[in-house]
Each structure stands twice: as C-alpha cells, then as structure tokens.
Image (cartoon, rainbow, N blue to C red):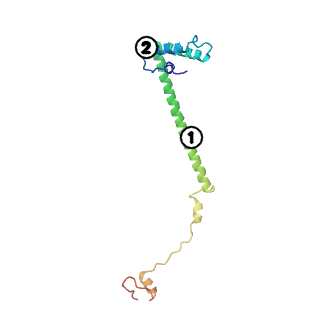
Amino acid sequence: MRNFYEVLGVTPSADDEVIKGAFHDLAKTFHPDVNSGNALAERRFKEIGQAYDTLKDPKTRAAYELGLAHQRKIAQRRIGAAAMTGFATSMFSTVVISVVMIWLLTDGRKASAGPDREATRPTKTVSVPQRNLQELVDEASPTTPAIGKREMKL
C-alpha cells in the first residue's frame, strides 16, 4: 500500500482544503470517462479515491497517521536488526579467517607451553670464565697501536 499523502501529492501537514483540491485535480485527470479503456488510469483513480476517503475525515486520518508511525517504527527495528546481523556475521567471518590464516602460517602445528618446549632447552649450562682487565692487558701484544695520544704500557 502506498502512502496516501504521496498518492495525492500533498505533505502530511496539508490542511483539508489542500487535500480536497489535490483530489479534485487528480480525479479529473484520471477519471474513467476521460480515460476510457485505460486500466492503469482506472486503478489510479480508485487509489486516489481511497486516499481521499481516508484523509478527508479527521478520525480516519489520525488512525492512518498512527499506522504510518507504527510502520516507520517497525521498519527502523528491521533496519537495526539487519545491521546487527550483518555486524555479527562480519565479526564471525573475521574470526574464522584469522584462525584459518594462523593455521596455514603455522603449518597446522600447535604452539604449546607444555613439556614439548623443554626439549628445545639445553640441559647443560656452560659457564664462560670471567677475565679481568689486567689479563687482557697482559695478553695484548707490544705491537698494539697507540690509543689516542697515550701509549699503552706493558
């Protein structure tokens, strides 16, 4: 069902005189006597008559506007639900793609912190002997070039 205000070509804030004038102009244009044999014009004339019958009476107009408001609210809920469904689907697909990429990049191996990691650690620790500065100086050869302006004494 189309919006009756759009059918008559008026705004929802239009008064009764504007609605009546729009109805009369459209009724003259689409009247079956003027458009004999034209099924489209006949359907349009019936639609114009239904719109005017609804909007001319203040009670039926108020009920119609209440129905329009309800339809708008339902449409907004549907849009919100569709947006949330799209968001959830997008998030789910992102997680799935991430898991698949991790699986492909790790060749399907699991990274664990269990006993498998112990096997890669060395079992024996090797200590490196500490040497002091004097031992290093003693090992230095007499052909060591001078550092800066001072020469190294042996």
Is residue 13 found left or right of 115 in the rendered image?
left
Residue type (three-letter) at the residue carrying disc 2:
Glu
Q: Nearer the viewer, residue 2 or 17?
A: 17
| Numbered disc in front, either 2 or 1 | 2
Cα–Cα span, label 2 and label 1 = 51 Å
Query: Residue 149 sits in which quadrant?
Result: bottom left
Query: Residue 92 sits in which quadrant?
Result: top right
Q: Mark 2 Cα within 10 Å, few/some/many (few <14, many 20+)?
A: few
> How many numbered circles does the render carry?
2
Residue 108 placed where, x, y %?
63, 55
Q: Mark 1 Cα within 10 Å, few/some/many (few <14, many 20+)?
A: few
Residue type (three-letter) at the residue carrying disc 1:
Thr
Quarter containing the N terminus: top right
Residue 15 placed where, x, y %?
42, 16
The residue at which mark 2 appears reads as: 17
Q: Residue furthest front?
A: 34
- For numbered disc 1, what is the local secondary structure? helix
x 50%, y 76%: residue: 128
Residue 28 placed where, x, y %?
52, 13
Give whichever of discs 2 and 1 has the lower sequence position. Answer: 2
x 49%, y 14%: residue: 25
Q: Nearer the viewer, residue 75 or 101?
A: 75
The residue at which mark 1 appears reads as: 89
Q: Nearer the viewer, residue 100 or 134?
A: 100
Is 118 rendered above or below residue 59?
below
Q: Residue furthest left?
A: 149
- For numbered disc 2, what is the local secondary structure? helix
x 59%, y 65%: residue: 119
Tell me, for residue 34, which label it has, or none.
none
Quarter containing the C terminus: bottom left
Is 99 rendered above or below residue 145?
above
